[in-house]
Image (cartoon, grey):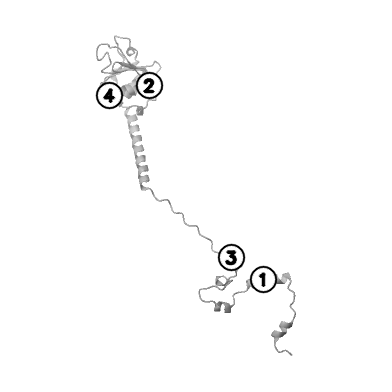
Amino acid sequence: MLSSVGPVAALLPAAPVTPDATASLTLAAEAAPVEPAAAAQTPAGQTPTGQTPTGLTPRLAGALRPVATPAATLPPEMDAAGLLKAVGLEDVARKAEEARLAREAAARCDADLDGLGRVKPWVRDAAQFLSCLYERPDVLGVGQRARASDHPRGLAVDLMVRGERGDRIAECALANQEAFGVSYVIWEQRVNYGDGWERMSDRGGDTANHMDHVHVSFERDGGSGDAVAARCT
């Protein structure tokens, strides 16, 4: 008679393993914790072959994998030169706008227009605009002239100036031709209807040749009235 259980178990025929039994064994193996003995035999700092840290099974360990944290997006480097340039351009634009507004306000000054007489309202407006922008020269309006003229009808103004200031007044009047309702400008023995200067014949003297004043004639029905000082130099 055999006294050891082991040999008897070895002589018994093995029972067939069914699929259900195989699945049960697999689940049991996955759920089984690590044996203390196996953990004790593993050197410190190492993981037994086929196992995961902390004794978790591969399936549970996969579910607990750490989520990668995306790298923080750093703000772009500050471009000091670009910032200073932008601030400088903004300052330039602000000053330009302030200058424009100041010039527009200057064109509506309280100029002395007593020499105009009973000129048309749009003629008076233009005379005020031009006089205020260009240091308030003497202005003449209604009056008799030896030659055919718009002065007697209140449709002309003379601004008494010489040289560079006269150049600027003449160009400003033409730059706002539609707004003022200007028909033509005479200056330094030249006439301009809006399409360029034409030489005039010599009339004999500075005043007759318009060397000492800018003459501006106006249309009978005036202009749009929206003159802009920024068009003038």
Q: Quarter of the image containing the C terminus?
A: top left
Give how far across and how far down residue 229 sits, in percent. Answer: 35, 27
**Residue appearing at x 71%, y 85% in the figure:** 7
Q: Which residue is mark 3?
A: 62
Q: Earlier in the sequence, mark 2 or mark 1?
A: 1
- Residue 111 falls in which quadrant of the image? top left
Q: Is residue 175 above or below residue 45?
A: above
Circle 1: element type: helix
Residue 229 appears in view: yes
Q: Which residue is mark 4?
A: 165
Give how far across and how far down residue 105 sits, in percent. Answer: 33, 30
Give the CA distance from mark 4 to mark 1.
106 Å
Front: mark 4 or 1: 1
Q: Which residue is mark 1?
A: 26
Q: Which residue is mark 2?
A: 177
Front: mark 2 or 1: 1
Q: Earlier in the sequence, mark 3 or mark 2?
A: 3
**Residue appearing at x 72%, y 70% in the figure:** 20
Q: Earlier in the sequence, mark 4 or mark 1?
A: 1
